[in-house]
């Protein structure tokens, strides 16, 4: 428990932004700039094409909220687009699909996960949801239940899940914050999936890496987010290539 508290305390100065009243849920409307992706997770929207492939290749679905959609960025600056470039550069033959939805919650994720997986040929799901739930003080057990449902649906289709964790401080107290950290860890253990301990590691709370709202990474910050995701995804891809 002391080690967990130490880890959370390490990030406290960087995580105050997730307590802001306008957090990710505000990004569903009134945005000062357009969302990064016109193809960001609305049923019927067109998924981005792979950067180098004209043939059918396995898909990696980036599934989340505005942090995945690329709020305030151009489509090319979103983390899924950057991830596609990294894959291409390293010779991995996958198409990255941006299935981020600004304002998205874990409950909304349950409702739209089947649509996201119906694209066909999905091999990996990068699951980044929960921050909007915690802003509203939703019981962590409910968020965990929703995330588990998403994971289980993906696994039932033989889709491997990479879970993006959140560390946060909230107005609901330290016990609530501890529950959040524990939920992501236990989900990863229970479902035997890889966990990114903190999706915004090295970015959250650093002004020069975030937009004016101090919530969403700017282009430079998003490059670090993409690096963080790829660091955890690459071993899974390498293992897959050896099968």
Image: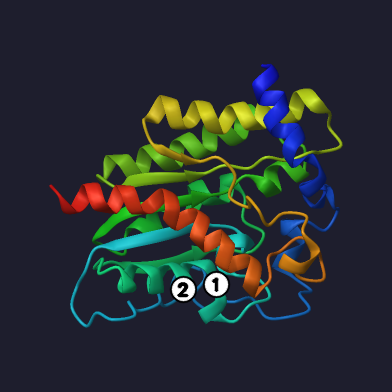
Q: Is residue 208 above or below residue 228?
A: below
Q: Using residue 2 as the reference point, say whether residue 75 is left or right of it.
A: left
In the rendered image, residue 234, in percent from the top left (x then y), is placed at 35, 54
Q: Residue furthest left?
A: 243
Q: Which residue is mark 2?
A: 81
For the point 51% across and 62% down, the residue is 226
Q: Residues within 10 Å of mark 2 (few under 14, many from 20)?
A: many
The label number, if any, that marks residue 177 in the structure image: none
Residue 62 placement (x, y as % from top left): 45, 60
Q: Which residue is mark 1?
A: 78
x and y, in percent, of residue 123 in the image: 27, 54
Q: Secondary structure beneath disc 1?
A: loop
Image marks 2 and 1: residues in contact by CB distance under 8 Å: yes
Residue 198 position within the rendered picture, expressed as x and y whole percent measured from the top left: 59, 44
Q: Is the residue 176 above or below the residue 149 in the image?
A: above
Q: Residues within 10 Å of mark 1 (few under 14, many from 20)?
A: many
Residue 94: tell me if it is visible: yes
């Amino acid at each position: 428990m002391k080690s967990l508290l130490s880890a959370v305390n390490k990030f406290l100065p960087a995580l105050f932004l997730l307590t802001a009243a306008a957090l990710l849920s505000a990004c569903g409307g009134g945005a000062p700039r357009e969302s990064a992706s016109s193809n960001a997770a609305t049923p019927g929207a067109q998924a981005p094409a792979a950067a180098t492939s004209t043939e059918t290749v396995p898909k990696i679905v980036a599934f989340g909220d505005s942090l995945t959609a690329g709020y305030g960025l151009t489509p090319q600056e979103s983390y899924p687009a950057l991830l596609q470039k990294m894959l291409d550069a390293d010779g991995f033959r996958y198409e990255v699909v941006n299935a981020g939805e600004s304002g998205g919650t874990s409950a909304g994720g349950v409702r739209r996960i089947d649509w996201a997986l119906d694209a066909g040929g999905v091999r990996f799901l990068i699951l980044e949801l929960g921050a909007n739930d915690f802003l509203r003080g939703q019981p962590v057990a409910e968020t965990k239940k929703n995330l588990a449902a998403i994971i289980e649906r993906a696994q039932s289709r033989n889709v491997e899940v990479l879970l993006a964790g959140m560390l946060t401080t909230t107005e609901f107290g330290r016990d609530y914050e501890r529950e959040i950290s524990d939920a992501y860890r236990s989900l990863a253990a229970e479902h035997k999936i890889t966990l990114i301990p903190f999706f915004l590691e090295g970015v959250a709370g650093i002004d020069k890496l975030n937009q004016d709202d101090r919530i969403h990474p700017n282009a430079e910050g998003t490059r670090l987010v993409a690096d963080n995701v790829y660091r955890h995804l690459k071993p899974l891809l390498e293992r897959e290539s050896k099968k």
